[in-house]
Amino acid sequence: MIRRFDWGSNSDISALIEEARKALDQKGWEEAVNVFQFLSIWIHHFQSKLGQLNGVSHLSNPDDPPDAIGHFSNHDIPIEVCSITPAHVKQSDDLHRKVGGNQGRYDVPISQKPRSAAEARDWMYGPGGVDIWESFTDAMETVHHSIVDAAKKKFGKPSIAKLEPGVLLLPGDRLFGYFGEEEAVRAAFNAVRKEVPAANAWILAVHHQWNGRECFSAIDDPSSGFALKREAKS
């Protein structure tokens, strides 16, 4: 199924997100949100190369890949989305939604996986959370490997390798927001260029946006190199 969302010159991202919520399933909606936010942050970068952005199409099985297509006046560009949030972090967020209320919460480390749901609950809400400590080195190694492993997995699929070069968008909740993750991301992008030849013509991107205005969003464009934005308004 292909669902197109029109993008005006002054697109209201919140309106696009709500439109997508009504039109897509949960997975599709999450993909669309990341694409909308990412393009809104990097709109000048892409429009300087591809012309006016007129719309975004989201593709669901059996029509994908790619997950989305950016429709620019001069050229369409495929956008493949792959979340790099560790599974145990997603599970801890699910647990938090179930617990709810106003309870205090400790974040589960991105580099350490709880052995059970009970341990995750203790880390997040119990006395065990006080003693959980994560080294900066471990966190940055997790960021690095998450990016490289996702790229290897994606470009190992014949369906992706056959696409016209576009954007590999890697959203990662809670992987970004540390001081110094820029170097981990740069190193990961460089590793992808060396270890995944099929990715060399693609734009590599990581993205996380929260509070509707704060973000960590980085791209590595073969034509212009690395660029980073740490804060933007949606």
Image: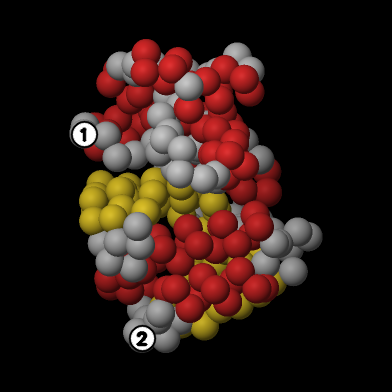
Q: Nearer the viewer, residue 168 or 83?
A: 83
* Residue 206 in picture, x, y percent from top left: 39, 46
Residue 145 in sight in this render: no
Label 2: how many Cα within 10 Å (few below 14, some 14–19, many 20+): few
Q: Nearer the viewer, residue 86 or 97?
A: 97
Q: CA distance from mark 2 to mark 1?
A: 34 Å
**78 vs 114: above or below:** below
Tell me the residue at 62%/48% (across/down).
160
Residue 182 in sight in this render: yes
Outermost residue toward the right?
62
Tell me the residue at 48%/22% (across/down).
126
**4 vs 149: above or below:** below
* Residue 16 in picture, x, y percent from top left: 50, 76
Please state which amino acid type lies under the numbered disc 2.
Ser
* Left or right placement of residue 142 versus residue 233 in this view: right
Tell me the residue at 44%/73% (across/down).
14
Place residue 180 in its image quadrant. top left
Disc 1 is placed on an element classified as: loop
Label 1: how many Cα within 10 Å (few below 14, some 14–19, many 20+): few
Q: Which residue is mark 1?
A: 179
Outermost residue toward the left?
179
* Left or right placement of residue 14 versus residue 21 in this view: left
Quarter of the image that includes the N terminus: bottom right
Disc 2 is placed on an element classified as: loop
Q: Which residue is mark 2?
A: 9
Tell me the residue at 27%/34% (across/down).
178
Please state which amino acid type lies under the numbered disc 1.
Phe
Discs 2, 1 touching: Cβ within 8 Å: no
* Residue 190 in picture, x, y percent from top left: 33, 33
* Residue 51 in picture, x, y percent from top left: 36, 78
Q: Nearer the N terminus, badge 2 or badge 1?
A: 2
